[in-house]
Image (cartoon, rainbow, N blue to C red):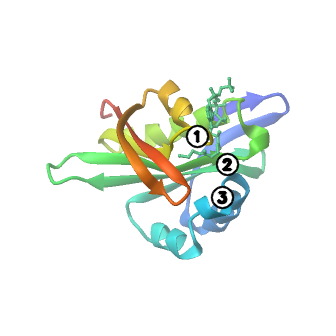
């Protein structure tokens, strides 16, 4: 478990079972704009996917952020990791909560033998490109009109399998 003490809050990240997907559904709607969120059926699909793992950022007994990571086997036998979604409630941003979540998700993926991790994020203002760059991700592809609300960049980080 990853842990960080911030003033009177104690942030931890747990890998959570799929029965907590309702919390993720609610958090998503408080973190992203509605048109950026997974629908209930998309989330249900992820919940039953053996490739998906769910993470919750907890402040004491409350969930204040979440992450969804994917792991897929490639034709060459390697495993690819993907940060599918990550977010913290606005009050918990810029105090290291995002880093705590990302570190926990990466650690899990690396333990699961992925060779590299990819993600997509909105290009420009409103996206988190700078946040991921700070954590070692590099732009690998520009994706015009990737989202209904804008262009995206695909980012990639090579990791040492553990
Ligand atoms: C992306 C996100 C999870 C980062 O969490 P965080 O708790 O703010 O991250 P940290 O505190 O560990 O790091 C903060 C640093 O990352 C950078 N950063 C974080 N989010 C950023 C953003 N959206 N745009 C630009 N820089 C950002 C800043 O440099 C910030 O440094 P600062 O404290 O000097 O401002 C959070 O901003 C968030 O939930 N955003 C909304 C959802 C989202 O865009 N998710 C990514 C979709 S792929």
- Image point 33% across, 31% down: which residue? 159
Q: Secondary structure at mark 3?
A: helix
Give the x, y percent position of residue 9: 81, 36
Query: Is there a contact, CB below 8 Å, between mark 2 and mark 1?
Result: yes
Earlier in the chain: of badge 1 and badge 3, it is 3
**Residue of label 1:** 101
- Image point 38% across, 64% down: which residue? 50
- Image point 14% across, 49% down: which residue? 76
Give the x, y percent position of residue 25: 65, 65
Q: Does residue 120 appear to the left or right of 140 in the view shown?
A: right
Whether disc 2's CB lies below 8 Å from ligand 1 is answered yes
Earlier in the chain: of badge 2 and badge 3, it is 3
Query: Is there a contact, CB below 8 Å, between mark 2 and mark 3?
Result: no
Q: Residues within 10 Å of mark 3 (few under 14, many from 20)?
A: many
**Residue of label 2:** 65
Residue projecting furthest to the left: 76
- Image point 47% across, 67% down: which residue? 46
Residue projecting furthest to the bottom: 41
Earlier in the chain: of badge 2 and badge 1, it is 2
Observer-side mark, 2 or 3, equals: 3
Which image quarter is the C terminus in? top left
Whether disc 1's CB lies below 8 Å from ligand 1 is answered yes
Q: Does residue 88 appear to the left or right of 109 in the view shown?
A: right
Image height of 69 relative to 94, above or below = below
**Residue of label 3:** 28
Ligand number 1: quarter of image:
top right
Q: CA distance from mark 2 to mark 3?
A: 8 Å
Is 69 or 104 nearer to us in this picture?
Answer: 69
């Amino acid at each position: 478990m990853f842990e960080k003490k911030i003033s009177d809050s104690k942030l931890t990240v747990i890998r959570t079972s799929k029965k907590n997907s309702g919390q993720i559904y609610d958090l998503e709607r408080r973190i992203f704009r509605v048109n950026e969120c997974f629908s209930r059926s998309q989330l249900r699909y992820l919940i039953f996917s053996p490739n998906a793992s769910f993470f919750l950022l907890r402040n004491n007994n409350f969930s204040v952020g979440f992450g969804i990571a994917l792991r897929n086997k490639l034709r060459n036998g390697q495993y690819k990791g993907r940060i599918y979604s990550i977010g913290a409630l606005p009050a918990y941003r810029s105090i290291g909560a995002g880093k705590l979540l990302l570190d926990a998700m990466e650690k899990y993926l690396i333990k699961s033998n992925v060779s590299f991790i990819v993600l997509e994020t909105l290009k420009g203002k409103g996206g988190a490109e700078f946040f991921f760059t700070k954590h070692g991700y590099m732009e690998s592809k520009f994706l015009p009109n990737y989202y209904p609300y804008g262009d995206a960049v695909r980012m990639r980080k090579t990791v040492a399998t553990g």
